[in-house]
Amino acid sequence: MMRKFLLAVFSLFLAIVVSVITLQAAGVVDFVSLAMNQSEKIPALAPHITTYRLGQEESEELARQRQSLVEQEQSLLALQEEIASSREELEVERRELALQYAQLKTEAQRLQEWEQELKAQQEVVQDLERVRKIYEEMDPKRAASIFSEMDKSVVVTILSGMKPKLAAEHLQAMEPQLAAQILQLLSSE
């Protein structure tokens, strides 16, 4: 008989435990809070329950802080990636600017060389203009004797800048063979 009684009590206890677990899991009744509230009323358990609740609050606060730290870490990692990307973009732009600067420097040097060549050519033109004026003023016979000693291309340059009448007078004063060569060079210009 005692066995039957113990079996009935055990079955009842087991049914109660299963019911409590089911109701707790379903969220119908919060037996843990009820048990805690009731346990706090017992003077011997009250300090332990208070300590448990403080520990639970600290645990929740630590979880919130941990979550906040995770979010901050993710934010910092995103910022770090953004900085690295910006740094790469700046490096690419710096290289492009350095290349453009080198090209501009080369172009400026080339322009400076052209300017120097142009000045030198202008000086040559001015010198030829002075020489041409001298020969225009000179007696054609005297000029012809000097022309016979000069390079034919220089003579052609001087004569081509003269008025046609003066150039003709100078050509008439030259030896016929030299005059023919000069005329041929003049006509090919």
Image (cartoon, rainbow, N blue to C red):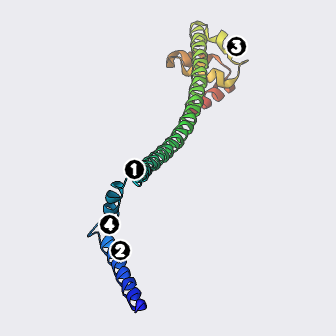
Q: How dense is the environment of label 3, judged by Cα within 10 Å: few (below 14), some, or many (20 and up)?
A: few
Q: Is residue 85 or residue 144 the one in the foreground?
A: 85
* Type of amino acid under label 4: Phe
Q: Are marks 3 and 4 in contact (CB under 8 Å)?
A: no
Q: Residue 17: horizontal and vertical position, in percent?
A: 36, 76
Q: Is residue 29 left or right of residue 67?
A: left
Asked which secondary structure carries label 1, the reply is: helix
Q: Which residue is mark 3?
A: 146
Looking at the rendered structure, which numbered label has been put on residue 31?
Answer: 4
Looking at the rendered structure, which numbered label has been put on residue 50?
Answer: 1
Of pointers 1 and 4, the one earlier in the residue sequence: 4
Residue 11 versus residue 111 in the image, above or below: below
Residue found at the very far right of the displayed protein: 149
The residues tagged by marks 2 and 4 sit, at their Cα atoms, a distance apart of 9 Å
Q: Are marks 1 and 4 in contact (CB under 8 Å)?
A: no
Residue found at the very far left of the displayed protein: 28
Asked which secondary structure carries label 4, the reply is: helix
The residues tagged by marks 1 and 3 sit, at their Cα atoms, a distance apart of 127 Å
Identify which residue is drawn at 32% across, 78% down: 19
Asked which secondary structure carries label 3, the reply is: helix
Q: How dense is the environment of label 4, judged by Cα within 10 Å: few (below 14), some, or many (20 and up)?
A: some
Of pointers 1 and 2, the one earlier in the residue sequence: 2
* Type of amino acid under label 2: Ile
* Type of amino acid under label 3: Ile
Looking at the rendered structure, which numbered label has been put on residue 149?
Answer: none
Identify which residue is drawn at 70% across, 13% down: 146
Q: Residue 89: horizontal and vertical position, in percent?
A: 50, 42
Looking at the rendered structure, which numbered label has been put on residue 21?
Answer: 2
